[in-house]
Image (cartoon, helix red, strand yellow):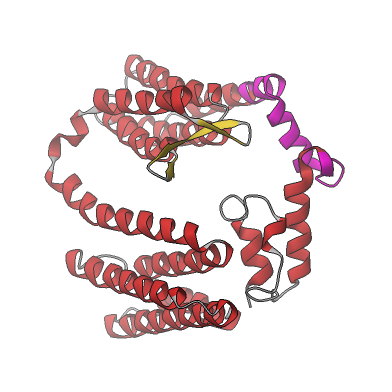
Amino acid sequence: MIALMLVYTFECFAVFNYADEYTQRSIFRKQNVLMFLLHMIAFLVMYLQTNETKMIGFYGMQVVLFLAVILLYTKIYPRVSRLVVNNMCMLMAIGFIMITRLSYSLAVKQFIIVSASVAISLVIPVIIRKVKALSEWKIFYAIAGVVMLGVVIIVGRVTGGAMLNVAIGGFTLQPSELVKIIFVFFVAASLKDDTSFKNIVITTAVAAMHVLILVVSKDLGAALIIFAVYLMMLYVASRQPLYVIAGLIAGSGASVVAYKLFNHVRVRVLVWKDPFAVYNEGGYQVAQSLMAIGTGSWFGMGLFQGAADQIPVAESDFIFQQLRRKWD
């Protein structure tokens, strides 16, 4: 399978060497064939290993989803980048393969979420284009973001030392992921026509509120993303490098404070420096992942040839090491 992936990746770059539309379409069709072939081989292996007919049905459902994505995006948006659509489908295929290998039930949940997300994403560009008032809803975006993050503090579940998730009907949702999108809408709406110092201070205060709530939730990764996104958008809107410099200085100071305040941050720093030195005090996951990657060598071991259950949270945070060890 790694050979198919290499050819697919080569075609991603090769398409830029051709200006004529006919040749580009030919390359995109070749990419589709490679993706479906890789996907089919992987699920055939899983079926032969498990001898469960549900694998065949699940495979068919995914093929229908990929075909729908390719056809609908190209029909609804004729000027869409076929390369982006192909890459999106390839990444979804790889994700489904790896999660199905780790947990069939989780893969089914992932399929439902992805299908719903694709349906929503199909209409979002149309909504943005048609509803001109979206740029006027900055107060709504600000309130929605703060409320959604605040709900996690009240009813959220602690995962890995941080309050991240809310369980609804058997599904685990992470509101901060949606808030990232809402936050971008807020900053864009706020700075669209007004980059005065007063408005920047107000916008920064709202952004800081988002970051502080995430810090209280100990979701420092999301806090860092919100912070970085705000700095970039602020620079794009204002073209003032001093804001970025001031933000980086403030962010550096906040990182030191977070290191002093939160024990799990200190543990993560130690794990980052030398996971084997703190193997029993928090470094187990990273150390096992590094050993798994090394075990896979250059070409991986193949599906069902490793010990997937030896890595905690392998189906989410550490999916890469499973991919690296098994892919061949």
Q: Is residue 134 above or below residue 201?
A: below
Magenta stretch encompasses residue 273: yes
Say whether residue 207 is visible: no
The residue under the point 71% across, 25% down is: 263
Name the one closer to the observer, 254 or 244. Answer: 254
Check the picture and name the quadrant holding the N terminus: bottom right
Percent coordinates x, y for residue 46 in the rendering: 55, 77
In the rendered image, the residue lying farthest to the top is 198
Q: Is residue 296 above or below residue 288?
A: below
- Determine whether, in the image, residue 28 is placed left or right of residue 121: right
The residue under the point 78% across, 43% down is: 283
Percent coordinates x, y for residue 217 in the rendering: 53, 25
Q: Is residue 273 above or below residue 44?
A: above
Percent coordinates x, y for residue 188 in the rendering: 30, 34
Residue range (magenta): 253-280
Name the one closer to the observer, 218 or 6. Answer: 218
In the rendered image, the residue lying farthest to the right is 277
Magenta stretch encompasses residue 192: no
- Determine whether, in the image, residue 293 is placed left or right of residue 193: right
> Residue 73 falls in which quadrant of the image?
bottom left
Name the one closer to the observer, 250 or 170. Answer: 170
Name the one closer to the observer, 147 or 6. Answer: 147
Q: Main secondary structure of the magenta part?
A: helix
